Image (cartoon, coloured by chain):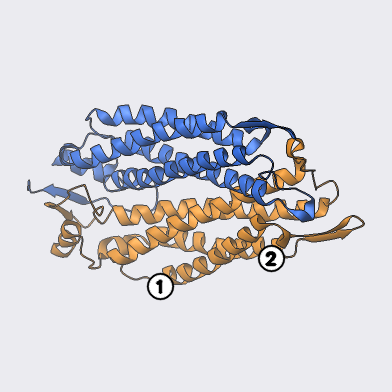
Chain colours: A blue, B orange
Amino acid sequence: MAEKNSNLATGTSGPCQEEDGNSGGIRTVEMLLRLFPVGLCVAALVVMIKDSETNDYGSLSYSNFTGFRFLVHANGVLAGYSLVTAAFTAVPRPMTMPRAWTFFLLDQVSTYLILAAGAVTTELTFLAYKGDVTVTWSEACGTYGHFCKQATASIIITFLVVICYILLSLISSYRLFSKYDAPVGYRNKGIEIVDFGN
Amino acid sequence: MAEKNSNLATGTSGPCQEEDGNSGGIRTVEMLLRLFPVGLCVAALVVMIKDSETNDYGSLSYSNFTGFRFLVHANGVLAGYSLVTAAFTAVPRPMTMPRAWTFFLLDQVSTYLILAAGAVTTELTFLAYKGDVTVTWSEACGTYGHFCKQATASIIITFLVVICYILLSLISSYRLFSKYDAPVGYRNKGIEIVDFGN
């Protein structure tokens, strides 16, 4: 009891057994939400890396576009991060304050990174499909239809990763803020949590 | 005491006086973080709307690009949302659960929306500066230098809004989860908050 109180009141990093004991369900959901993106990111990455087309008009590869290279890198980083955090989540362990903050911040950064990658490549593919007459950018997908379809598939998979990470951000922010003080501003000192054991 | 207990244990929407009383500092910060984007969004919007250039080679306007139009709309929506929520935050009032959830969800959506707008237009401006030889997209900024600089200014202002909204998301998620249960999963029932009054 005192341990939980000291955690909340002083923001120290001692373990919190009550919530760890009760959160088996959400831990399973979280582990799945971290495992899905491993497969999804690798799929999006492979689909994009293998995306090239050669025809009578020339040759086009994902590497010709900075935006698509960004998507590949972002998916690579998130595949690795998702794998590491899924393995970490798989083993029940006390969620200390530094761990809760690390998960929270890295989940936030990952969400913003993969969302930015998805947005950038959506714009790029939109331009490839539609072109822009005023700056004489011709549409490319009439000539390189297969290339565009494969890029679109990779982007759709990336947005599935975005959905997983939006949910993960929700979980990690709940886990952090339901246990620990914000770094500045709010004063929760003097509040004790009493566990009635039900 | 019982009121705070019932709030946390059952997730009902009664007011929580303790935190409202102590959170004047963070409320001021939050109000400023909601006021800044009003000005910033209007600035980004006006700079982009006024962005057009005519020279010997032709004429270029922001409206010729779907990505820039998206930026204008996103900044317009966020200017309005920021103004409404700043006005709402200005008056001290109990933060009920529906209000906390509404702020949290709308802040999250706003952050993702403005980040996506920033990412999309960064890619568009990057292409305007660099072009892409493989799909015969010529760079446009050699011819329309003023247009590109003004678009870049609008995008930079938009990313300042992104920073404000990342911080606002942090505040609204803290306020929600430090007071209320997650909708599913974690079980916090049987935990009572005791205010020692210091």
Quadrant assignment for the N terminus of chain B:
bottom left
- Locate residue A128, reporting x and y percent: 66, 46
Label 2 marks a residue whose chain is B
Identify the residue position indicated by label 1 in the image.
B91
Q: Secondary structure at mark 1?
A: loop
**Residue at the location (33% across, 66% down)?**
B99
Q: Could you tell me residue B136's position as x and y percent?
A: 77, 40
The x and y percentages for residue B86 are: 47, 68
Q: Is residue A76 left or right of residue B76?
A: left
Disc 2 secondary structure class:
helix
As drawn, which residue projects farthest toward the right?
A: B56
Taking depth in this image into account, of B176 and A55 the one nearest to the observer is A55
Left or right of B46? Residue B147 is right
Where A167 falls versus A40 (above or below)?
below
Q: As rendered, which of A197 and A111 lies closer to the eye? A: A111
Q: Is residue B26 toward the left or the right of residue B126 in the image? A: left
Q: Residues within 10 Å of mark 1 (few under 14, many from 20)?
A: few
Neighbour tally class for label 2: few under 14, some 14-19, many 20 plus, Cα within 10 Å: some
Residue A106 visible in the snapshot: yes
Gap in Å between the C-alphas at discs 2 and 1? 29 Å
The residue beneath circle 2 is B46
Q: Earlier in the sequence, mark 2 or mark 1?
A: 2
**Residue A50 location, x and y as percent?**
56, 28
